[in-house]
Amino acid sequence: MLKRLPFLCTALLALAACGHSNDSSTPATSSAPAPTAAPATSAPATTPATTGSAAATPAPAASAPASAATTAAAPAAPAKASAFVEDPKWVEGKSYFRIEPAQPKVSNTDKIEVAEVFSYACPSCNAFHPMVDQLAKSLPSDAVMAYLPVSFMPQENFPMFQRAFLTAQALGVADKANDAMYDAVWKTKELSSESASGQGLKPMSELPTLADAAKFYAKYGADPKEFLAVANSFSINTQVKRADELVKAYGVEGTPTIVIDGKYRIDLRAAGGYAQMVELAKYLVAKEAAGK
């Protein structure tokens, strides 16, 4: 992915992504959904970004439980992947990238992990979200979905959404509120980082806060006071640090990104689009299952 241009990351057809600059990432440890911070301006960017960004839509256009990211429950998982067959259209170093050395997984699973590196405030992640849901449901029984939230775009409120997601995971409400959180940012705008006019970002002092996120998660069973206490706890501070370290260790340059078992990285630009990211993720799961 390209380095992030100032402000919101908008979609460039199906190839736009939210980006960040490497120097703003925190050293990584291990977990989803994130990206690096870049100076913000008030005009939306039209170039695909690297680690994080703001609003975009799918076609016309540019993410989870008690560790830095958790596994997502997938209903009635299909049987284990069938025999792996090499496909010449997927080229390592071009279509996807090997992470060397391999890094820890986001979750504690002993299955093959498919981790989405994301932010609720990233427009490309919002566009990709329905496909990620379908990917999670279609994974074979020996694979599982996980989510690693990023923080690299502070001007677009990525750090707040990262901490809120990890807190919601710890309280057991992240999964059931996942779809609604995207809607709160991109449809109702109650947690949006955009100005009321839709032209540029809100000042940092006016961005939604953890207290606002606590009110949102209260609709899904979280006590607002407990949410804020947990959000500022040593445990969540540790998970935030681990998430940032994993993002760096995985070599993430933008969102959405998919990481397979801490070994392979798939980004939107290299894969060629959202649908291709999903297809490639399934291909690499089969490759990993076959021990190739």
Image (spheres, rainbow, N blue to C red):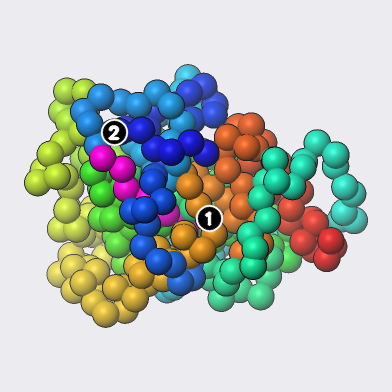
Q: Position of residue 118 (x, y in %)?
A: 44, 50
User: Quarter of the image holding residue 221?
Assistant: bottom left
Q: Position of residue 158 (x, y in %)?
A: 30, 50
Name which residue type carries label 1: Gly
Residue 200 image-quadrant placement: top left
Using residue 28 as the reference point, say whether residue 81 is left or right of it.
Answer: right
Q: Residue extending furthest front?
A: 23
Which residue: 58% across, 51% down?
Answer: 258
Q: Helix, strand or loop at disc 1?
A: loop
Tell me, for residue 251, which label it has, or none. Answer: 1
Q: Position of residue 85 (x, y in %)?
A: 89, 49
Q: Position of residue 137 (x, y in %)?
A: 63, 51
Residue 126 visible? The answer is: no
Q: Residue furthest bottom?
A: 234
The quadrant where residue 38 appears: top left
Q: Which residue is mark 2?
A: 7
Magenta-drawn stretch contains 188: no
Secondary structure of residue under mark 2:
loop
The residue shown at (23%, 44%) is 155
Vertical placement of 277 versus 173: above or below? above
Q: Earlier in the sequence, mark 1 or mark 2?
A: 2
Q: Is residue 278 left or right of residue 200?
A: right
Q: Nearer the viewer, mark 1 or mark 2?
A: 1
Q: Nearer the viewer, residue 237 or 81?
A: 237
Q: Which residues are magenta?
A: 32-39
Q: Residue at x 22, y 31 (%)?
A: 41
Q: Is residue 38 magenta?
A: yes
